[in-house]
Image (tube, rainbow, N blue to C red):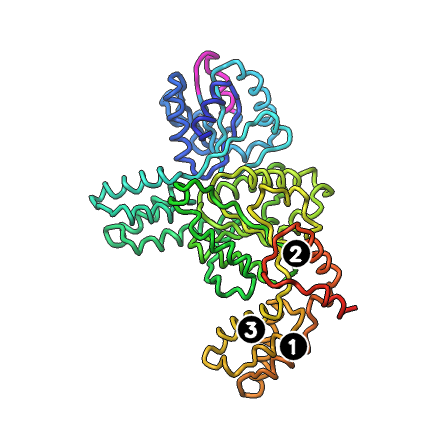
Amino acid sequence: MSFSQEFELLLRACYPLIYIPTPEEERVEAAIAACAKRLGNRAVYIWDFVDGYQDNPNNEGVGRRNPLQALEFAEQLPSNAGAIFILRDFHRFLEDISISRKLRNLARKLKSQPKNIIIVSPQLEIPAELTEVLTVVDFPLPTAAEIREETLRLLTSIGQPLSDKLLDELVRSAQGLSLERIRRVLTRCIASHGSIEAEDVELILEEKRQSIRQTQILDFYPATEQISDIGGLDNLKDWLLRRGGAFSDRARSYGLPHPRGLLLVGIQGTGKSLTAKAISHHWHLPLLRLDVGRLFGGLVGESESRTRQMIGLAEALAPCVLWIDEIDKAFAGVDGRGDGGTTSRVFGTFINWLADKKSPVFVVATANNIQALPPEMLRKGRFDEIFFVGLPSQEEREAIFTVHLSRLRPHNLKNYDIKRLAYETPDFSGAEIEQTLIEAMHIGFSQNRDFTTDDILEAASQIIPLARTAQEQIQFLQNWADAGKARLASRASRLSHRIQGQLN
């Protein structure tokens, strides 16, 4: 259901108090005015703290610097007069006892009248005593069609034609921005060189990065890693490569649904995060990183609002990759937290979205401790697949050494005995191999020479891999995967039983 459909339904159903959290004041007011016009009998009054009511000469200045008077004005109009009262930034006054009480009184009185009070605010802040009388309606970011219409309007104003290909690229790059930001950046392009050019796409993307940073919920993550940078994990890479075109129009015509996402489970340092970055780069999709801890706020309703904001932003930027690192830490013990049920509500909203989402947001979640994840997260339908990323086999360690040494010493790669290095580093994860090479470089650098195979082996001898310090956790994960709970990311069979025998 679109915003206009939902909003009109609430108006017809006589919902007296509606709260719309959005920074797009101008756009939401235009949408409300359009709804009022379609209903045919609703006048629109707009109030703010500085100027009071502004749209009618008879009411000019009423309620100026007096939010209680603004509510009383709504009450004083004839009971049969259809009206919508838009109160800007009214969230700042909701903690006042007189305002809170007056709103609750109006909630009863206006049920039988064609009047609606609309609070428009850039953020959602609802005191506990008003949660039952205020109805929250989300106002989504502009759709691709709205962005296209606004871009064409600006192009028409300067008399510039634009190819369909460049127009599509501009629209795609602007998705996830407010209409005001889009107008601002396009106007900046026009002011700069009198027209909109292909290179202006980068300016729009930078505006998008700035916008996402300001939410303090998502990070726009630059991804330069490639599938070839992942050593081993052949099953996982094959799975990803087969879905490389799954976001295209051709895939929709074929009848394929959008890929939903992956849950990557395994111990630390085995390449789970690297895989998330490589997916984004290989599929040419923007990568958004979610720190789940940022979803939780101290005010009532704030955490749920941030979760909805995150979902709305991710869907507005779709198609995209949403990377959630260490999701097990965010929702560990979700049912036992003493936070008034906030974590449970956030978790419920999130997993329901995972199951129901139709938008092309590909979620890549990583987890180190499968025992900490709520069972609902592992249910079929949340993700397309769950992969177990275990410790690399000897063959995979060869691939990992080759990837790193090809980057560090591309011209001297033949000087290193990669087979010996892989053989001498059993139980090492990809991250531990990388750290070994860094330590070997320190050894060589301190002696004014290049590092050698022997330096790498010496560095490896000084590192105790996690496989030995967290043996029980790794064995549990391996047994869990062997029981068919997840697909193996590697083709090579994991030699966990041999390693366990060595460690014992």
Could you tell me residue 231's position as x and y percent? 54, 66
Dot 1 lies on which element?
A: loop
Which residue type carries mark 1?
Glu
Q: CB atoms at circles 2 and 1 under 8 Å apart? A: no
Q: Residues within 10 Å of mark 2 (few under 14, many from 20)?
A: many
- Residue at the (27%, 42%) spot, across then down: 154
Q: CB atoms at circles 3 and 2 under 8 Å apart? A: no
Write down the residue under mark 2.
368
Q: Is the residue 262 above or below the residue 428 in the image?
A: above
Of 81 and 53, the residue lying toward us: 81
501 in magenta: no
Mark with earlier residue (3, 1): 3
Q: Residues within 10 Å of mark 3 (few under 14, many from 20)?
A: many
State left or right for residue 367 relative to residue 215: right
Of 82 and 263, the residue lying toward us: 263
Q: Is the residue 77 above or below the residue 393 in the image?
A: above
How far, Cα to Cα, is label 2 from label 1? 26 Å
Of 341 and 193, the residue lying toward us: 341
Could you tell me residue 454's position as x and y percent? 61, 84
- Residue at the (43%, 47%) spot, across then down: 247
Which residue type carries mark 3?
Phe
Nearest to viewer (mark 2 / mark 1): 1
Of the numbered discs in the image, which one, if any, rests on residue 401?
A: 3
Dot 3 lies on which element?
A: helix
Could you tell me residue 104's position as x and y percent? 59, 22
Residue numbers of the magenta segment: 69-83
Which residue type carries mark 2?
Asn
